[in-house]
Image (cartoon, helix red, strand yellow):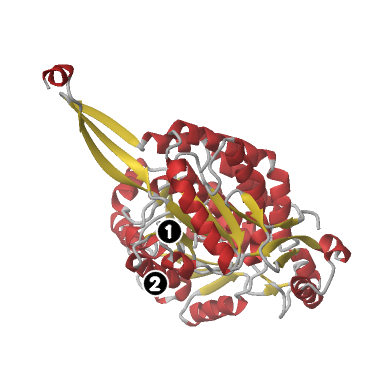
């Protein structure tokens, strides 16, 4: 195994546990090339009845599966470390953050290789890993968050302090589709003075454990952080354990909206702070004066990972004056997108497990009047149409009329497959009235992650910014899915972030405001006493 075996990391040490069980990472290429033998190999390795040394490069590595006792140990270790870690000066913690960002770049190539083995296309893996040190871990972002941690004012003898204090022990439940990246983004909560427990999902545990054990943990150890500041383990879902634990203060939860909102209620009932990163159903508006080349490039990001990412433009509203041309350009761009193995250059599609869901949404849309303008087939890894292929052809449907568009599931609901609806409002509507319809449509979206707009008209841009209250992130003539320094990558209201959803950095979401008023005895009063 190229990357070896990763134990749990608890209290500053590696923990194998009693009768250690391993979960192995069999490369996605192995599974796509010959599915059933690949699944049989993984099963036999996980059961311990096959020696991984004979599997060659089909197996990238393995992780120890934590049991209940190890999960409890991790929570105790984090709670024990919390008082000491929060007393480390903020400036020192921020410097540790800079070192982690630097170490991430040093480990970039190896982490990319693991992500590719797990199924992330190389182009996407390189972009994500390279981007993290310059976005969520950038000097601009960490500096902004640090600036929010404390404000001081004086009123005569009184010193007034408004400060943010760490919540305590924060647990992260990263998603299966991007575990390592989201765990790293959430881990900035460390720098606010929280201690952390990270659960690596069993399906993609290797990249997550590698990032924690080889990148973050060594920096903390070298800086003298107390053991237990970071704890990471692979295992089954631990939400019930976290909710029942006296040690847990916050849970950073990634997942679907229905289960996520149920968890929010359970979290509040248990006295924990829920920080939700749920589904996205982003809207992109393309106005009649838009730069269509740039808009098409941004909209095409929808097909990254076959649409199985939350922060892509899931639906497009195209001004009737440019709708036909926009769709033609999108079809041309989409035809260039092909399936392939994740290690191949320029591949962005990944296997789609929800193909039945895809065809259900497509058939419903067509039955209700939508027009299929491109795609609609299963594909083999070489691009050949097939009834049993693991890939789904990038697909576009045209939906005429904005008023009834949300009657279609592909518009109303988050999708997790490459089916993009282009909504074309009724022609002949004056632009002022049309813009009001579009703003209402965007604002009534039940989701709230991102929205974007393409226009060269300053007055239209101003009205869009003034009129859109929905969404944690607005992009104007900028990459819909791109992450930038200083701005939060995630967050938003509604089905995206729940009742407490907002665009905010984990470093701030895992802290709370505290007001302090200090009147110090004067020298005269001390002498008089």
Find residue 252 and report its horizontal and vertical position in percent. Answer: 46, 58
Mark 1 neighbour density, 10 Å: few (under 14) some (14–19) many (20 or more)? many
The residue pinned by badge 1 equals 248
Furthest residue in direction left, as rendered: 528
Could you classify mark 2 by the number of other residues whose Cα lies within 10 Å: few (under 14), some (14-19), or many (20 or more)?
Answer: few
Outermost residue, front side: 529
**Visible in this render: residue 331?**
no
Q: Secondary structure at mark 2?
A: helix
Q: Nearer the viewer, residue 505 or 422?
A: 505
Image position, residue 275 (x, y; %): 41, 58
Given this view, does label 1 or label 2 mark the residue nearer the observer?
A: 1
Instruction: Specify the quadrant that holds the C terminus.
Output: top left
Residue at screen point 47% across, 50% down: 80
The reply to whether residue 199 is visible in this rendering is yes
Which residue occupies 52% across, 67% down? 238
Question: Residue 221 at what x, y percent from top left?
Answer: 60, 40
In this rendering, position of residue 227 left or right of residue 267: right
Quadrant in which the N terminus is drawn: bottom right
As rendered, which of 523 and 8 lies closer to the eye? 523
Q: Secondary structure at mark 1?
A: loop
Residue located beneath label 2 in the image: 262
117, 223: nearer the viewer:
223
Identify the residue shown where x is 40% and y is 76%: 407
| Quarter holding residue 55 | bottom right
Check residue 35 in the rendering and tell me which mark sits there, or answer none: none
As drawn, 465 above or below 336: above
| Alpha carbon separation for disc pair 1 and 2 | 18 Å
């Amino acid at each position: 195994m190229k990357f070896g075996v990763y134990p749990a990391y608890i209290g500053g040490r590696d923990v194998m546990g009693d009768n250690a069980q391993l979960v192995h990472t069999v490369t996605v290429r192995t599974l796509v090339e010959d599915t059933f033998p690949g699944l049989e190999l993984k099963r036999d390795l996980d059961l311990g009845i096959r020696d991984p040394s004979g599997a060659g490069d089909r197996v990238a590595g393995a992780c120890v599966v934590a049991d209940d006792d190890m999960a409890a140990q991790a929570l105790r270790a984090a709670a024990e470390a919390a008082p000491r870690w929060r007393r480390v000066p903020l400036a020192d913690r921020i410097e540790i953050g800079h070192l982690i960002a630097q170490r991430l770049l040093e480990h970039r190539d190896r982490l990319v290789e693991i992500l590719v083995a797990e199924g992330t296309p190389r182009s996407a893996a390189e972009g994500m890993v390279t981007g993290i040190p310059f976005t969520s871990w950038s000097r601009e972002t960490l500096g902004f968050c640090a600036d929010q941690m404390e404000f001081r004012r004086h009123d005569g003898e009184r010193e007034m302090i408004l400060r943010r204090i760490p919540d305590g022990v924060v647990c992260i439940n990263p998603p299966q589709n991007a575990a390592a990246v989201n765990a790293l983004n959430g881990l900035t909560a460390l720098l606010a003075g929280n201690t952390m427990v990270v659960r690596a999902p069993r399906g993609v545990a290797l990249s997550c454990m590698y990032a924690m054990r080889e990148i973050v943990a060594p920096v903390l150890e070298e800086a003298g952080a107390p053991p237990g500041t970071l704890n990471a383990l692979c295992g089954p879902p631990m939400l019930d354990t976290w909710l029942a634990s006296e040690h847990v203060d916050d849970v950073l939860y990634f997942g679907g909206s229905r289960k996520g909102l149920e968890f929010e209620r359970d979290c509040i009932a248990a006295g924990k702070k829920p920080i939700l990163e749920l589904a996205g159903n982003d809207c992109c508006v393309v106005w009649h004066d838009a730069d269509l080349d740039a808009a098409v490039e941004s909209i095409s990001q929808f097909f990254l990972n076959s649409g199985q990412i939350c922060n892509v433009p899931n639906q497009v509203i195209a001004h009737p004056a440019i709708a036909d041309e926009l769709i033609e350009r999108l079809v041309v761009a989409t035809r260039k997108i092909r399936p392939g193995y994740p290690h191949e250059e320029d591949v962005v599609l990944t296997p789609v497990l929800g193909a039945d869901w895809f065809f259900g949404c497509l058939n419903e849309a067509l039955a209700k009047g939508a027009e299929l303008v491109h795609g609609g087939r299963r594909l083999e890894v070489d691009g050949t149409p097939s009834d049993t292929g693991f890939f789904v052809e990038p697909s576009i449907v045209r939906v005429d009329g904005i008023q009834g568009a949300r009657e279609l599931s592909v518009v109303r609901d988050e999708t997790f497959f490459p089916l993009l609806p282009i909504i074309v409002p009724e022609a002949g509507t004056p632009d002022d009235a049309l813009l009001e319809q579009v703003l209402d449509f965007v604002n009534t979206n039940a989701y709230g992650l991102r929205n974007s707009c393409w226009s060269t008209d300053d007055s239209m841009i101003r009205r869009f910014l003034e009129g859109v209250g929905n969404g944690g992130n607005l992009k104007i003539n900028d990459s819909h899915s791109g992450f930038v320094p200083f701005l939060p990558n995630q967050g938003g209201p509604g089905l995206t972030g729940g009742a407490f959803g907002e665009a905010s950095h984990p470093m701030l979401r895992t802290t709370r405001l505290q007001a302090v008023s200090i009147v110090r005895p004067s020298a005269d009063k001390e002498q008089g006493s």
